[in-house]
Image (tube, rainbow, N blue to C red):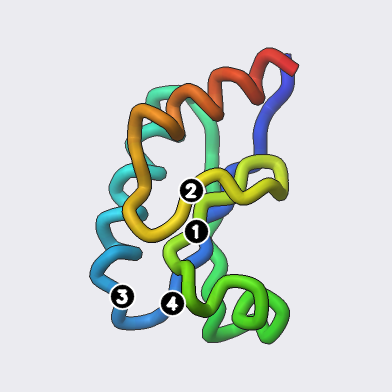
Amino acid sequence: MHTPEIVLVTKNQCHLCAAARDVVARVAAEAGLGWSERSIDDDAELHRRFAEEVPVVLVDGVQRDFWTINEARLRRVVAAARER
């Protein structure tokens, strides 16, 4: 079974990022997985790619959702990634 890498891309003072953090933490915990958070404020490349879309969820490096993170969709994506 594959262990997917879940990354939440955020920025400072972002109310959508706070909500996304809760969703990602919940889904990752349910799946028994860790996750990480990276800020566009600290990374010029992430800022260039995602400045208008944060928060963004990446699973195995692929953008899977942005702005308002859909919890059910993230569960499906994580489950599918685990099956690879």
26 over 52 or under it: above or below: above
Residue 34, located in which quarter of the rendered image?
A: top right
Q: Are the residues at dot 2 and dot 1 in contact (C-beta closer than 8 Å)? A: yes
The kind of residue on which mark 4 rests is Lys
Task: Give the CA separation, mark 4 to mark 1.
Answer: 10 Å
The kind of residue on which mark 1 rests is Val
Q: Secondary structure at mark 3?
A: loop
Q: Nearer the viewer, residue 31 or 61?
A: 61
The residue that label 3 is drawn on is 14
The residue that label 4 is drawn on is 11
The kind of residue on which mark 2 rests is Asp
Percent position of residue 45, x then y: 72, 79
Q: Nearer the viewer, residue 51 or 82?
A: 51
- Of circles 4 and 1, the one toward us is 1
The kind of residue on which mark 3 rests is Cys
59 over 50 or under it: above or below: above
Q: Which mark is residue 65?
A: 2
Task: Give the CA separation, mark 3 to mark 4.
Answer: 6 Å
Q: Nearer the viewer, residue 9 or 67?
A: 67
Task: Give the CA separation, mark 2 to mark 4.
Answer: 16 Å
Task: Give the CA separation, mark 2 to mark 1.
Answer: 6 Å
Q: Which mark is residue 71?
A: none
Q: In screen coordinates, is 5 left or right of 18?
A: right
Q: Are the residues at dot 3 and dot 4 in contact (C-beta closer than 8 Å)? A: yes
The residue that label 1 is drawn on is 56
Task: Give the CA separation, mark 3 to mark 2.
Answer: 16 Å
Mark closer to the chain start, 2 or 1? 1
Crowding around mark 1 (Cα neighbors within 10 Å: few <14, some 14 to 19, many 20+) is many
